[in-house]
Image (tube, helix red, strand yellow):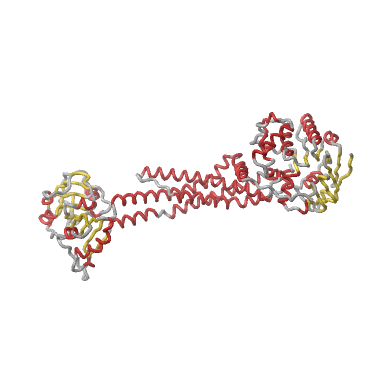
Amino acid sequence: MSTALRPARLRPTDLARIGTSGLRARPARAILAALGIAIGIATMVTVVGISASSQERLLRQLDELGTNLLRVSPGDSLFGDQVKLPENAAAMVKRIDGVTSSSQTAETGTTVRRNDLIPEGISLGITVQATSLDLLSTLDGRVRQGTWLNAATERQPVVVLGAVAAERLGMTGADAQVYIGDRWFTVIGVLDRMPLAEEIERSALVGFPAAKEYLDHDGHPTTVYERSADEAVESVRTMLARTVSPESPNEAKVSRPSDALKAKAAAAGAFTGLMLGLGAVALFVGGVGVANTMVVAVLERRREIGLRRSFGATRAQVRNQFLVEALLLSAFGGGAGVLLGALATFVYAQLNALPAVVPLWAVGGGLGATIVIGALAGIYPALRAARVPPTVALTQ
Amino acid sequence: MNVLEIRGVSKTYGRVHALRNVDLTIRKGEMVSIVGPSGSGKSTLLQIAGTLDRPTSGTVRVAGHDVSALSDSQLSALRARYIGFVFQQFHLSPALSALDNVADGLLYTGLSRRQRRERAEAALQLVGLSHRLGHRPNQLSGGQMQRVAVARAVAGRPPLLLADEPTGNLDSEAGAEVLSLFRTLNARGITIAIITHDTEVAMACPRRIRVRDGLVRSEVS
């Protein structure tokens, strides 16, 4: 009879063009409809971005500080009393293969106070410790103000304060006096922050000879710090306990301070579920907004649909047109949301001196989510559009 | 060859009989007017002739294709290839230029955008609007808008042009302008069926069909 009738395929570029025609006709409505999605995606990207930025800072710090620092302290013996480390523990450790530096500190059991009127029991959480002179180089620490101990001052009643200790004592500068044990000590220096040895931040440090002389200390260290080449860390680790406590090696505790920082970084990277949940709710509400807008659009554009059907559009082509419109609408919202979220992360990072990081997977995930939402929100209106009878083109 | 062949067609909406056992054949090259009061069933007849709707009973053939044997998407393809529509309200998109309005009528024909625009330009030339390609509908007069709509209907070179009250929204001068356009197109071989109230339009058609109460009452040839 005649050639078979087969509807022509709508080219993808044409589909995209007619998919945007409705949005272009009512831009204000399109923006409002996309706003919900934008807020949802922005929230999620910001939450992920801020936690990734915090994590990045800790990881960078870790990189800078290194992971080759080990710490040994005496554990409790089988009978519950404190095991003592030998007086020359640091020197013994230095002889282990691969160790580049080692130092020791000892808790003196006394407290540091602003003046002699404060009872001795008030410690403010500050430990008074004796220290070997090379502690600062082993820990890679820096003096913020004043000076560090030297061979002369380690015999004098002088003290160097950790950053936190100085803050708690209200010591803003060197050359002040503090009361330790039963006499005045002169503050000759304040240390910088020391993220790998927070216990030093909270310490008042005196020399070993001074501790013996003025604080009645026996000279046995309570902590040995050691740095080695990166590749030697594991082998040194196995040797440490045996070296400092040959009779009872399992009574010495060896730890790696950078592990705590690593755990902190991992915790910072785990963003809060609550905020993410809020973002998800906003996203859901945004999806409902898109669906609603599309349903209204279908009702308003019945005439246009009928006209397109009279041009020869199939039901599937009408359906796809509205599906594409919903997808573009939410993708538009999603794109704006990603930009907003990245901007918010950047601003937050600037204000908090963090490196701004927006993970690529968060951007991809955000855009992927909007595609899914757009499709879900568009299905019902698109099916309704496809059911509009072609005869509406002719009815007035 | 018969462009349109309607045999024993009835259409009922619930208990309303819009068409009762109608026979109508339109041959290639004819220009036919379909007249009748509102509610007579002439709009239903146009919907069925244009394959926008299917009859309750009877057969409709467009360019030889039996409509009842076609699926909805095949019917869409048939409309894209064989039928052009002109509406009383023009149905032009206010956001698009005359050229794009005409080109969009060819969206579902499988032509590329460039081809569509070329044909649209040719069609606008045919209706005497080659100087108005870039104008938006609100920059055109009523008669010009309807001529754009006619250009859109004929741009795909369909064998059958169906017009629903094409002069209903126009003053007499613009109406005459559109009517003379139809005659020109008919002279070029396009088969035209016009639903109209306008006696002037009806009288201008060589063949007139009167519809009343769902029946085809009289034919004057």
Residue B152 shows up from this direction: yes
Q: Nearer the viewer, residue A112 or A76?
A: A76
Label total for image: 0
Give coordinates of residue B11: x percent, y percent.
81, 51
Q: Is residue B78 above or below residue A255?
A: above
Q: Is residue B8 above or below residue A235?
A: above
**Left of A189 or right of it: where is B38?**
right
Q: Nearer the viewer, residue B71 or A294?
A: B71
Q: Quadrant of residue B136?
A: top right
Q: Is residue B173 above or below residue A15?
A: above
Residue B32 shows up from this direction: no
Seen as rendered, the residue at the extreme bottom is: A79
Give coordinates of residue A106: x percent, y percent.
18, 58
**Left of B164 or right of it: where is A366?**
left
Q: Quadrant of the C terminus of chain A?
A: top right
Give coordinates of residue A46: x percent, y percent.
44, 48
Give coordinates of residue A338: x percent, y percent.
48, 46
Q: Nearer the viewer, residue B167 or B154?
A: B154
**Left of B83 or right of it: where is B93?**
left
